[in-house]
Amino acid sequence: MANIAAKRIKREFKEVMKSEEVAGGTIKLELVNDSWTELQGEIAGPPDTPYEGGTFLLEIKVPETYPFNPPKIRFMTKIWHPNVSSVTGAICLDILKDQWAAALTLRTVLLSIQALLSAAEPNDPQDAVVAKQYREDIQLFNLTARHWTNAYAGGPTVIWEFNQKVQVLQDMGVDEDQARVALSTFDWGLERATEHLFS
Amino acid sequence: MKVTVKSWTGVATWRWVANDDNCGICRMPFDSCCPDCKLPGDDCPLVWGACSHCFHIHCIVKWLHSQPQQQCPMCRQDWKFNNK
């Protein structure tokens, strides 16, 4: 790894460990290997959002050219959000792309991703299906996002109706994640989701 | 009483006068050098932009070379070297 990248990541790592966000438990950062090229981030779902109470893991890959190019970050925890792919966890955030600046750090990027959870940008979607639901039925979107937070991120709110529908599809032999995606996509219409899965 | 100075050794210290402690690009203290240099001082100088932000010259040049637009990595204003 290039000298500047490795040195900077080491300094940043120490800075994050001393930060008040780590002390307050809203973000976390861990090393994945000894070469400092891969880290694991963790953010708490912000209060007053459907992600509240959930813990979301992020895969962070530091390129050789860091900090002249942004770190590559994606959600490892599945999440229902207009700017995050519900399939791959890819994040649509300008500072991870063309608005990256060398003065940004892993700490500020993690805080920006956390802020994205509080303020979605449905007009610049990463997941068109989620964004459509967000625009057309925000209440159903909030319930779906809360359900996903419960199912994947350890969130506290159990939505029994959704759990039951997922179970119905699982009883038909459908994989749990696939069942949840299909139901979420078709606004929890069991019939249409079933039709989609078996067509 | 008369004192005879037999010898003397001059000592001086120096530091950069910057508006920040660390370079925003490499995050090393300005009183040390950029990660690619060995010794701080004239071989690894600081430069200021018209926006008043300050970096190791080696760091800002690498940043500007890596970007399609020439902007300060702190404030995103167009980067101009401040030749003060």
Image (cartoon, coloured by chain):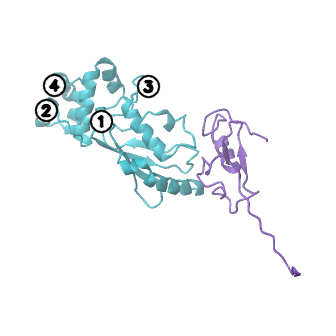
The residue to which callout 4 is attached is A190
Disc 1: which chain? A
Q: Amino acid at mark 2?
A: Trp
- Dot 1 alpha-carbon crowd within 10 angstroms: few under 14, some 14 to 19, many 20 or more: many
How far apart are the two marked residues, 1 and 2, measured between alpha carbons?
Answer: 17 Å
Dots 4, 3 in contact, CB < 8 A: no
Q: Earlier in the sequence, mark 1 or mark 3?
A: 1
Q: Say which of marks 1 and 2 sits in front.
A: 1
Q: CA distance from mark 1 to mark 3?
A: 20 Å
Q: Chain of mark 4?
A: A
**Type of amino acid under label 1:** Tyr
Find the distance from the CA under tag 2 to the CA under tag 4: 14 Å
Q: Position of residue B9 (x, y in %)?
A: 81, 74
According to the picture, the residue beneath numbered tag 1 turns out to be A51
Q: In which quadrant is the N terminus of chain A drawn? A: bottom right
* Chain identifier of the purple chain: B
Circle 3 sits on which residue? A124
Which of A149 and A97 lies nearest the eye of the viewer? A149
Instruction: Quadrant for the C terminus of chain A, please.
Output: top left
Q: Quadrant of residue A158?
A: top left
Of marks 4 and 3, the one in the foreground? 3
Q: Residues within 10 Å of mark 4 (few under 14, many from 20)?
A: some
Q: Secondary structure at mark 1?
A: loop
Residue position marked by numbered label 2 in the rendering: A160
Q: Is A196 left or right of A129, judged from the image as shown? A: left
Q: CA distance from mark 4 to mark 3?
A: 29 Å
- Residue A137 appears left or right of A113: left
The front one of A141 and B31 is B31
User: Tell me, what hue is chain A?
Assistant: cyan
Q: Is disc 3 placed on a helix, strand or loop?
A: loop
Q: Amino acid at mark 4?
A: Leu
* Chain identifier of the residue bearing label 2 in the image: A
